[in-house]
Amino acid sequence: MSTLNKRERTGAGLAGGSVLLVGGSVAASSMLNGYPVLGGQAVRYLAAGLLLAAWARLQHKPLPRPTGREWAWLAALAVIGLAGCSVLMIQATRAADPASVGVIIGAAPLVIIIAAAITARTRPTRRVLLAAAVVTAGSAAAQLGGATGPAFSAAGLAWSAGALAGVVGTSLLAAPVLPRLGALAVTVYACGLAGLLLLAAAAVARSAGGPPILRPPTPAQLTALAYLTIAVTALVFIAWYGALERLGVDRTGLFNGLIPVTSLAAVALTGTGAITPLGLLGALSVLAGVILGLSRAPQAPAGTVNQAGQRPQPGAETTPISLHSGPAPAQSAMIATTPQKAAA
């Protein structure tokens, strides 16, 4: 981590902090068992969007207005990365053992890197690709080493695969609009769109004889909803998108591998599970993979030439693949989310 510059260290802190908060959402989500899924998630995203919009107004930070193309990206982000991911994640944990879900979600870093490379028509560096593989393997080991072990089912596998697509979409679909709109605006717009979509879906489901849109929550459910709204949505998404601006898609995506590990720790802390030797080994492997992926490739010695016959410029370094080109994006308006830290 000592090889990172100040901007990259800030990004690593934001990404790491968001992962810690997402890990705590495991316990919060378990408290919502029996509460309407669509209506509850709609309230979560609408409230988070309104809170951030109010904060921006109080701080006199105007939110850039999206263009037509940007609205399309934001809508896709809301459908896949926010609404779809959160609902599918809840369904996956209801249909399968959390350890099994974690194994699949742990593959997110590798999927993100491959998808980003295909989209950008380039190849990821060997260092980052190796780091993603280490993170994925370590995450799987941490989950397979759980007390209950893997317990796959056809339904659980399908829901988990959908949740994995949502986790990947959270990063890839935000990348094209972050440079101009910034982390705060992207979070506000995406949360608002996701909340409206889920509210409409809940109304349709209710009209078809489904569960009620909302009902009065118990104190425990209200606490869980508040945590998911403020910590796991408002703070996590703006911190995650701030990390994307500073580290790029591929290196930020490596931190997704920590989500199952932090979830495992949260379960152990709440007394509903235990950390086994294999789980601890997996956690250490994930940490090693993240450090490897964040570190820079060795600099060429002064006076050497590259394959094009040119001498490297002072301070030149290998940059991560990204879904946008051009100069580095300007610093976005950020709330104080740097940890003292997941999609859904």
Image: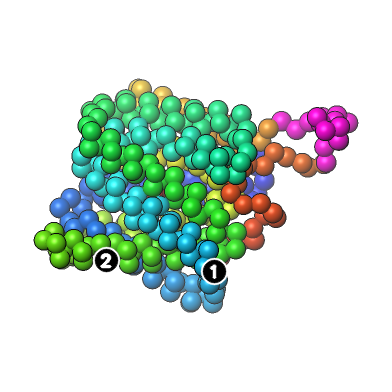
Position of 48 compared to 178: left or right? left
Mark 1 and mark 2 lie on one chain; the one further toward the N terminus is: 1
At x 82%, y 37%, the residue is 312
* Residue 28 x %, y %: 27, 50
Disc on res. 167: none
Q: Which residue carries the number 1 mark?
A: 67
Let me know if residue 334 appears in the view.
no
At x 21%, y 53%, the residue is 32
Mark 2 secondary-structure assignment: helix
Q: Which residue carries the number 2 mark?
A: 200
* Residue 305 included in the magenta stretch of the image: yes
Q: Residues within 10 Å of mark 2 (few under 14, many from 20)?
A: some
Position of 124 compared to 170: left or right? right
What range of the chain is rendered magenta?
298-313
**Front-most of residues 182 and 160:** 160
| Separation of marks 1 and 2 at Cα, in angstroms | 24 Å
Position of 344 compared to 127: left or right? left
At x 69%, y 54%, the residue is 326
Q: Which quarter of the figure has residue 51?
A: bottom left
Inspect the image, locate mark 2, and give the three-letter code of the amino acid beneath it. Answer: Ala
* Residue 338 x %, y %: 51, 54
Inspect the image, locate mark 1, and give the three-letter code of the amino acid beneath it. Answer: Thr
At x 52%, y 68%, the residue is 68
* Residue 13 included in the magenta stretch of the image: no
* Residue 278 x %, y %: 36, 22
Residue lying furthest left in this view?
209
Number of marks drawn: 2
